[in-house]
Amino acid sequence: MSDNDFEKFKYLISQDEDRSLLTIIMSGRLTLPDLNTVFSEVEKILEGNYFSYRIYDLSDCDIDISVMEQEDILTNVKNKLTRPNLKHRVALVSKDPLTQGFLKMLQYNSVAFQMSEIDIFSNQSDAINWLFS
């Protein structure tokens, strides 16, 4: 499969200040540099208003990130997107079994970074129910 076989990466970030919810919907071929771009945008948003609950919807993504790059992802999240002593829950959404497998490895590895409030869902509705439970 060539690079041209993948849809170009896109993302949309929506903010619900009343519920302290940030929703990031991504689609296309997702690489580590693309994810770092998303994290930088989220970091800018968090400078003005901390969102305790976040959904990263990867339902329409083709993940092109290696397992070895997961440490880079978790280091970025820990350093840029968390705040000490503030509640932080993250829901990861995908229906694809391969993507869910990647996300489960990410969830497992997140424990070493003291990020235990991460869970994986196949739809946003279930993710929202968990975030606010």
Image (cartoon, rainbow, N blue to C red):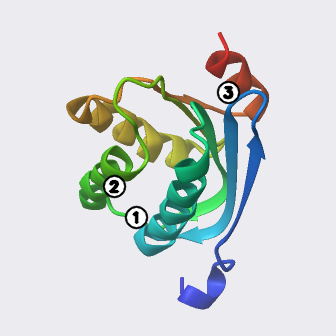
* Mark 1 vs mark 2, CA separation in Å: 14 Å
* x and y percentages locating residue 62 in the rendered image: 58, 64
The answer to whether mark 1 and mark 2 are in CB contact below 8 A is no
Residue 27 in percent (x, y) is at 69, 64
- SS category of the residue bearing label 3: helix
Query: How far apart are the two marked residues, 2 and 3, measured between alpha carbons?
Result: 23 Å
**In the rendered structure, which amino acid carries the disc numbered 1?**
Ile
Q: Earlier in the sequence, mark 2 or mark 3?
A: 2
Amino acid type of the residue tagged 2 in the rendering: Asn
Q: Mark 1 points at which residue?
A: 65
Please tell me which residue lies in front, 77 or 98.
77
Quarter of the image with the N terminus in it:
bottom right
Q: Residue at x 63, y 78 (%)?
A: 6
Foreground mark, 3 or 1, reads 3
| Residue under the image location 51 percent in, 70 percent down | 37
Identity of the residue furthest to the top in this view: 133
Mark yes or no: residue 36 visible.
yes
In the rendered image, residue 114, in percent from the top left (x then y), is placed at 27, 28
Considering the image in quadrants, where does the C terminus appear? top right
Query: Does the CB distance between marks 3 and 1 fall below 8 Å?
Result: no
**Residue drawn at x 69%, y 35% as measured from the top left:** 21
In which quarter of the view is residue 101 placed?
Answer: top left
Q: Quadrant of residue 109?
A: top left
Which of marks 1 and 3 precedes in the sequence? 1
Q: Residues within 10 Å of mark 3 (few under 14, many from 20)?
A: many
- Where disc 1 sits, the SS reads loop
**Residue occupied by mark 2:** 76
Q: Would you call the spot at circle 1 few (<14 residues within 10 Å), some (14-19), or many (20 or more)?
A: some
Sequence-wise first label, 1 or 2? 1
**Is 60 or 25 nearer to us in this picture?**
25
Q: Mark 3 points at which residue?
A: 127
